[in-house]
Amino acid sequence: MSLIDEIVKRAKANRQRIVLPEGTEERTLKAANQLITDGVADLILLGNPNEIKKLATDWGLGNIPKATLINPSESAKKEEYAQLLCELRKKKGMTIEEAREKVLDPLYYGCLMIKNGDADGQLAGALNTTGNVLRPALQIIKTAPGISCVSGAMLLLTKAPAYGQNGLLLMSDVAVTPEPTAEQLSEIAISTAETARVVGGIEEPKVALLSYSTKGSAKSESIDKVVEAVKLAHEKAPELKLDGELQADAAIVPAIASSKAPNSPLAGQANVLIAPNLEVGNISYKLVQRLGNAEAVGPILQGIASPVNDLSRGCSIRDIYTMVAITANQAIAANNRK
């Protein structure tokens, strides 16, 4: 069974309520129809129910009426959500009138559903920018306990079983925080280890914080940041198998690790790779994807108290299907922590 199949199987076994705010978008509706057919999640589609049903009929999507269809502007809960939003944002000066206007935005409405306990996760981005998807999530749901920054992890399903966990590696941050501080880098490492467990099914994440230096082979401020991040991560999550600073080969090749980092607890068997900044992470995963012919799944947003994920506007129906299942896996873990 492939990893994606395993992710879908876990979602089916513990169905979560996932909001799709872009409820009239064609790819989203077609993915939703298949998700309902397969029983992957209990879907909540936001938009005009009559329009959604008409589009479903036009496109032959017979299961769409089985989803919960909500028009935020006509919802019986819109005033309750407006009051909740106003309370959450009152220190930022939000008025009830402003809150009532925001609630009409499906991206805000979905996050308020999650905050109010009426949904478990949200997926958007087929029509909206990352900033638009993240803004209400950070304002309403906020970051997870002990985490101050959001990051994006990529699942890399390589065809090189000698590396990672039978060819599976996670890389982060590839999507959100351009120049993380040492504190943020430590949080990204801990968050990605959690994603490795919850989504990747990796029982023992082995986390390498990457650099162009291995254990003092070079000196610079950027290396110092990685070293400090390792120290902070050990303090926050002492049970986590984590090491750095390591060059990429010393992180994933046992023979090189034995030479360059003989005392590393990872012993060249890292399955989670933490880039020192977004530039390195983004470039690296795309090179692995293209030159190594690896399947890249994500980015999976992490660090939010309840899962909100972002799609590329060029996403496929399959991408949406997979990301709903991933969001459901994250929601299962988030609900278990409550």
Image (spheres, rainbow, N blue to C red):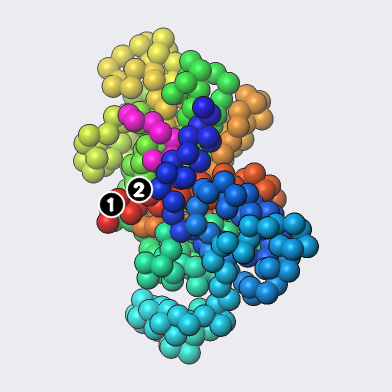
Whether 201 is among the magenta residues is yes
Compared with residue 141, is residue 313 higher up or lower down, i.e. above or below? above
Which residue is at the front of the view, 210 or 84? 84
Q: What residue is shown with label 1?
A: 337
Whether 199 is among the magenta residues is yes
Instruction: Name the element at disc 2.
Output: helix
Is residue 229 among what the camera can see?
yes
Tell me the amino acid under the disc marked 1: Arg
The majority secondary structure of the magenta stretch comes to loop
Compared with residue 183, is residue 222 higher up or lower down, i.e. above or below? above
Magenta range: 198-204
Which residue is at the front of the view, 118 or 225? 118
Instruction: Name the element at disc 1.
Output: helix
Q: Residues within 10 Å of mark 1 (few under 14, many from 20)?
A: few
Return the x and y of residue 84 as percentages of the image width and height.
Answer: 38, 79
Tell me the amino acid under the disc marked 2: Ala
* Residue found at x 60% / y 49%: 37
Pointer 1 with pointer 2, Cβ within 8 A: yes
* Residue found at x 35% / y 81%: 87
Is residue 102 among what the camera can see?
no
Query: Which of the 4 quarters of the picture holds residue 263?
Result: top left
Q: What residue is shown with label 2?
A: 333
Compared with residue 123, is residue 276 higher up or lower down, i.e. above or below? above
Return the x and y of residue 315 as percentages of the image width and height.
Answer: 67, 49
Return the x and y of residue 316 as percentages of the image width and height.
Answer: 68, 47
